[in-house]
Amino acid sequence: MQFLVVVLAGFGAGFINALAGGGSFLTFPSLIAAGLPAIDANATSTIALFPAQVATTFAYRSSLKKSLEDPRIDGKILAIISLVGGFLGALLLLATPEQFFERAVPFLLLGATLVFAAGMVMPQQAEKQLLSATGVLVAQCFVAIYGGYFGGGIGILMLAALTLYGLKDIVLMNSLKMLLATLMNATATGVFLFSGRIHWLEAIILSAGSIAGGFAGAHAGSRIPPLFVRLFVIFIGLALSLHFYLKAF
């Protein structure tokens, strides 16, 4: 039964990531349900979903090149911040006492769910620039550390910062978001690889499932409205937040 739960979670994560994002809402809880400690589950989920992130970033390569050519975007600094922040966030996770992290899980899930929900109503462009060039770099520092630590909702947080910075092309913003998320998870993955916290059988199952689910989601994209998928992710996030709160307290 635990094996089946992990397989279905991996497939479901890839499927909803292809349509709307939020796959970690399924993979992280499924690993806890399979008996992994919370920190192990978070680290294993990060590594399992990382190959799919790399593939998605590669698929965005043409629009990514255009976004990095935008004079308003300091791609090198943003990349360095993402790499360092992901590394620090992963170290912070490993330094967190297990019991403390278990109590923080429902609040992390709830926060990520609310951020994901806010992404549904977030305008694709701001009426005026509310963040300076320095401001968007500072915002990325916090997002990168959070991304290495937990990661739920980082895509929406980055899109929000880029929107407030005055960017308007959602395709270019999405490609930049994917690159930065992949970079922060690259260094987090590097830390987790040597942590002794990875459960490799579950990671491989999740990764394979997410790739299969991604292909299925891509084919089903024209038939399933993204709004329905987003509402499903929000429902799952709220339900899991309540479940882990009652479990921890």
Image (spheres, rainbow, N blue to C red):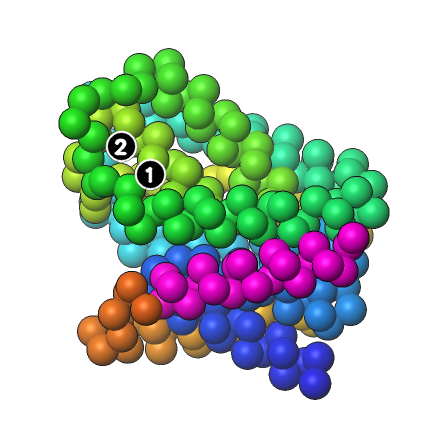
- Give the side of residue 59 with respect to residue 16, left or right: left
Residue occupying the point 68% across, 81% down: 3
- In the foreground, 153 or 207: 153
Q: Residues within 10 Å of mark 1 (few under 14, many from 20)?
A: many
- In the foreground, 230 or 176: 230
Residue occupying the point 21% across, 46% down: 171
Q: Position of residue 67 (x, y in %)?
A: 23, 35
Q: Label 2 amino acid? A: Thr
Q: How crowded is mark 2: few (under 14 residues within 10 Å), some or many (20 or more)?
A: many
- On screen, residue 179 above or below 228: above
Mark 1 secondary-structure assignment: helix
Q: In which quarter of the image is residue 131?
A: top left
Residue occupying the point 54% across, 71% down: 10
Q: Position of residue 31 (x, y in %)?
A: 68, 66
Q: Position of residue 132 (x, y in %)?
A: 31, 15
Q: Provide the residue designation for mark 2.
A: 163
Magenta stretch secondary structure, dominant: helix
Mark 2 secondary-structure assignment: helix
Q: Provide the residue designation for mark 1.
A: 159
Quadrant position of the N terminus in the picture: bottom right
Q: In which quarter of the image is residue 71?
A: top left
Contact between marks 2 and 1 (CB within 8 A): the answer is: yes
Distance in Å between CA atoms under marks 2 and 1: 6 Å
Report the span colored magenta.
229-249
Residue occupying the point 67% across, 63% down: 243
Q: Label 1 amino acid? A: Leu
- Give the side of residue 98 with respect to residue 123, left or right: right
